[in-house]
Image (cartoon, rainbow, N blue to C red):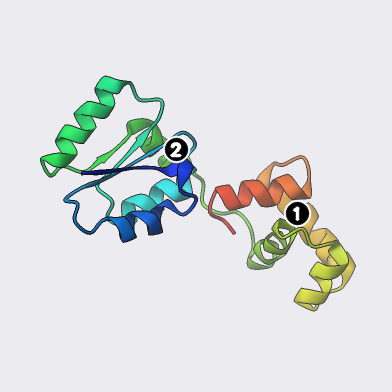
Amino acid sequence: MLVIDADDHPDVVDAARRLREGHDAVVVLGRRLPAVLVRQIVQSGIDAVVSKRASIDELLAVVRRTAAGEDHVDPRLAATVLRAEACPLTARERDVLRLVDRSLSTRRCAAELHLAEGTVRNLISSAVRKVGAPDRGRAASDARDLGWI
């Protein structure tokens, strides 16, 4: 049995794949696991994912069940995945937010995408509104956490 702390491994899915050899089960434990990461963990075949908000008794029960061959997704985390909305952003809005997430200016975004600066400003404005964020940086960050970019 291998228990990996997602908070200590930024790329927990790859870490779990690499470390899995020699272990019959892998449990991922994390404090803040965004919906996209929980989905990746489950899809990668990791046996269990548990929130650090779980009590010690809950964690021990999950470890025992996982060792016995059962899969487990913490109900709180499963609810987060189920509540995650489908991406409302257009392909161009996602392109722009990816560049904003890299801290590129409007001018640099326009140059990278071969668009006019005004078009980029309009795309950013639309994306910020759809994400419901207060500014472009937060929109990019939120979209990344939701797995939209």
Name the foreground residue: 149 vs 10: 10
Name the foreground residue: 130 vs 54: 54
Q: Residue at x 32, y 50 (%)?
A: 42
Q: Which mark is residue 126?
A: 1
Check disc 2 and give the amino acid type. Thr
Judging by the rendered image, the residue that carries numbered circle 2 is: 80
Q: Position of residue 60 (x, y in %)?
A: 22, 27
Q: Is residue 89 left or right of residue 76?
A: right
Q: Is residue 10 visible?
A: yes
Among numbered discs 1 and 2, the one appearing first in the sequence: 2
* Vertical order, 75 against 149 (above or below): above
Quarter residue 108 falls in: bottom right
Q: Secondary structure at mark 2?
A: helix
Q: Which mark is residue 51?
A: none
Q: CA distance from mark 1 to mark 2?
A: 25 Å
Quarter residue 111 falls in: bottom right
Q: Residue at x 59, y 59 (%)?
A: 149
Q: Is residue 65 left or right of residue 113?
A: left
Q: Residue at x 63, y 57 (%)?
A: 89
